[in-house]
Amino acid sequence: MNAAATPTALTRPDGTPLRVLVVDDEQMLTDLLSMALRMEGWDVRTASSGLQALQAARDFAPDAMVLDIMMPDLDGMSVLQRLRHSGNDVPVLFLTAKDAVADRVAGLTAGGDDYVTKPFSLEEVVARLRGLMRRAGTATAGDAEPILRVADLSLNEDSHEVFRGDDEIELTATEFELLRYLMRNQRRVVSKAQILDRVWNYDFGGRSSVVELYISYLRKKIDQGREPLIHTVRGVGYMIKAPQ
């Protein structure tokens, strides 16, 4: 069975490209995100400050926003509050370097729809945006769902739902990214270096021990008490495959 289902292209209901506004004061980051989103076929604009974001939201009328919380002149929370007060209900995905529960709650309470914490995977941002726009009814696609499967394990890239048989499995954002990478490379051995680069790819100077740690987390959630899907290839790396 082929694990890597190609996600269906999302467009506006009239067939035109979805519009995404990316707001961050780090030029390198906006360039990377813009490239990834344009590869999805979306129309992308960028802004580097809160005031620019408000102006671009009026001029560009985006279908979704990627909004950094910490910015010069007007932070992301204030931008979102002004948008909501003006009646603009555009779905917003927060980018934040803060990982405290209180910061996440504050962002969602302010009217944000989702968040990712830096460092993050570009694929995760794209998947979260796809999910936001589907849920908001902004985007249309074919009937196919972007679901990866290995034996009785399934992963939905849009909704971030993971099931082993009939049991739903709760994963952290990093565990989800690691599992997705393994499933996209079903029956291929991927090295610790490849996993570090792909899952923790944005300026991550980590060690291979973090990969071992997260593989153990995944095994406890995915494989414990079941026929194992995640395998260690000693001296090489890891592989996920269906039982023979």
Image: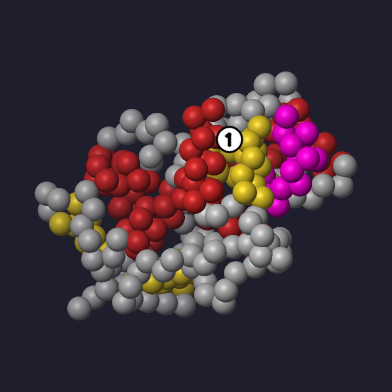
Tell me the quarter of the image containing the C terminus: bottom left
Which amino acid type is shown beneath numbered disc 1? Thr
Whether residue 57 is in magenta: the answer is yes
Secondary structure, mark 1, is strand
Residue at the location (64% across, 67% down)?
140
Asked if one can make out residue 7 in the rendered structure from this viewpoint, the answer is yes
Q: Does residue 37 sit above or below 187 in this rendering?
A: above
Residue at the location (64% across, 28% down)?
48
Which color scheme is applied?
secondary structure
Q: In x, y percent, where is residue 237? A: 19, 52
Q: In x, y percent, where is residue 207? A: 27, 35
Q: Does residue 224 sit above or below 81 in this rendering?
A: below
Q: In x, y percent, where is residue 114? A: 63, 49
Residue at the location (66% across, 32% down)?
47
Number of marks in picture: 1
Q: Residue furthest left?
A: 235
Residue at the location (30% across, 52% down)?
215
**Residue position for label 1:** 96
Asked if one can make out residue 153 in the rendered structure from this viewpoint, the answer is no
Whether residue 170 is in magenta: the answer is no
User: Left or right of 83: which side holds 198?
Assistant: left
Q: Which quarter of the picture shows residue 77?
A: top right
* Predominant SS along the magenta part: helix
Tell me the quarter of the image containing the N terminus: bottom left
User: Left or right of 178: which side holds 85?
Assistant: right
Q: In x, y percent, where is residue 45? A: 64, 40
Stretch in magenta: 52-66
